[in-house]
Amino acid sequence: MLKKIGGFLLICFFIFSAGLFFHTPQEERDKLIKKQKDSISGLPICAGSPIPFFVDAPAIPDEIKVIIEKWDNCVGSYEAEFSGGYSGGWKSGKRHFYGVWSNGEDTYIGGYADGLRQGYGRKLSFLDIQEEGYYEAGKLKSSWWF
């Protein structure tokens, strides 16, 4: 009888211990989001940010690019009157860490690395979720665990 109780307790212990090492998809997502947001907390404001400009074109004007190229390890934003903008972290003149990009119709909220989507992110179109998951090098790699 004592062996059965000991065996039962041992099985319960292993089941409980396994639970400490496995996380739900929501817990993993929440950890990733927190890590990405924490990456920009404490960074200084980029010189010249925010930058508003008034151009009816999707491209960023050269005079604005010259300012943005100098942004490194800081938080900054630009906004074009007709073509949207970005607000978030910058490194070596590229979107990095965590930020929000929008063109007026589509919005991406999430991680960036070297100007490309990287890490957890959510792409919305007119506030309806289109994609959500883990991005690598700008492309959605997996969404099944989110």
Image (spheres, rainbow, N blue to C red):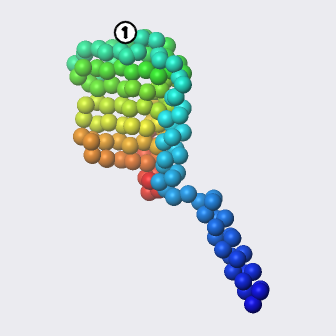
Looking at the image, residue 75 sits to the left or right of residue 80; the answer is: right
Which quadrant holds the N terminus? bottom right
Q: Is 105 rendered above or below residue 45?
A: below
Residue topped by disc 1: 63
Secondary structure under tag 1 reads helix
| Amino acid at the residue labelled 1 | Glu
Residue name at image x 68 percent, y 70 percent: 14
**Which of 27 and 113 lies nearest the eye of the viewer?**
27
Looking at the image, residue 102 sits to the left or right of residue 136; the answer is: left
Furthest-top residue in this view: 63
Label 1 crowd bin: few (<14), some (14–19), many (20+), radius 10 Å? few
Can you give x and y, in whole percent of width and height, for residue 48 in the image? Answer: 42, 11
Furthest-bottom residue in this view: 1
The quarter holding residue 127 reads top left
Residue name at image x 70 percent, y 77 percent: 9
Looking at the image, residue 49 sits to the left or right of residue 56; the answer is: right
Residue 93 can be seen, yes or no: no
Looking at the image, residue 18 sits to the left or right of residue 129; the answer is: right
Residue 27 can be seen, yes or no: yes
**Which of 96 and 66 lies nearest the eye of the viewer?**
96
**Which of 124 and 23 lies nearest the eye of the viewer?**
23
Count of numbered badges drawn on the protein = 1
Can you give x and y, in whole percent of width and height, for residue 106 in the image? Answer: 29, 36
Residue name at image x 51 percent, y 53 percent: 27
Residue name at image x 52 percent, y 44 percent: 32
The quarter holding residue 103 reads top left
Can you give x and y, in whole percent of width and height, for residue 68 in the image? Answer: 44, 16
**Which of 68 and 35 lies nearest the eye of the viewer?**
35
